[in-house]
Image (spheres, rainbow, N blue to C red):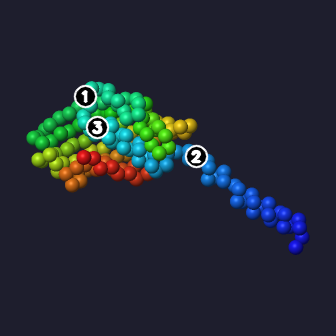
Amino acid sequence: MDPRIIAVMSLVALTACNDTTAQLDPPEGLVAVEIEALVALVVDTGLFPTPPPASDPWPCPAGGTASRTLVFTSPLPGTIEREGTVTLDACATTSPGGVLTTTGSVTLDDRFVQEDGAFTEAAGSYVSSLDWTLGDRSGTCPLQLAVSALNGGLRVSGTACGVAVARDVR
């Protein structure tokens, strides 16, 4: 075989083996575990903080604050209805990719029925478009979430950043 052909084939094979650029480029958006961290931050810090915050605003896990403007009503014993917004102001948490910071407001409208400390009914929606930063990446993540009763607790599910998500609460 012609040595020039062998040299070209070797160069092509070496180039193919060493071309890791596509594998090393960071993603432009959030990856699945980072989306899970964002949803956990929204649900656990903003929508259903445990323990309930003693002041408004209250601190987020890794910096920034969360606050709320809500109207609570109780039309029947054991029933709570909420309507309003939860605002995340540079609210941060840690994620596998580093510190994830979110800013924006979540509009909420929900209703809960409790019997003997367990949720027997839950319905509502949580809608937002949150700005986020993580290292040198940034973007916007649309949220379309709903709440339902599940085994005495709550489940928040829907889409975040275009990905199906679910998070159990309490």
Q: Given the image, on which type of amino acid does mark 3 rest?
A: Pro
Question: Hey, which quadrant is residue 16 in on the image?
Answer: bottom right
| Residue at image point 80% right, 60% down | 11
Q: Amino acid at mark 2?
A: Pro
Query: In the drawing, does residue 125 fall left or right of residue 92?
Result: left
Q: Which residue is mark 2?
A: 26
Count residues near mark 3 (Cα–Cα under 10 Å), then give few for <14, some for 14-19, many for 20+: some
Assess disc 2: are there few (<14), some (14-19) or many (≥20) residues with their C-alpha within 10 Å of its C-alpha.
Answer: few
The answer to which of marks 1 and 2 sits earlier in the sequence is 2
Name the image quarter holding the N terminus. Answer: bottom right
Look at 20% across and 44% down and name the residue there: 112
The answer to whether mark 2 and mark 3 are in CB contact below 8 A is no
Amino acid marked by disc 1: Ala
Q: Which of the numbered marks, if any, corresponds to residue 54? A: 1
Camera-nearest residue between 125 and 52: 52
N-term mark: 2 or 3: 2
Q: Secondary structure at mark 1?
A: loop
Instruction: Please tell me in which quadrant of the rendered image residue 59 appears.
Output: top left
Residue 168: x and y in percent read 29, 50
Q: Which mark is residue 49?
A: 3
Residue 155 horizontal side relative to residue 102, left or right: left
Task: Give the distance between the C-alpha atoms of the residues marked 1 and 3, in whole angstroms.
Answer: 11 Å
Question: On residue 34, which mark appears?
Answer: none
User: Left or right of 159: which side holds 119?
Assistant: left
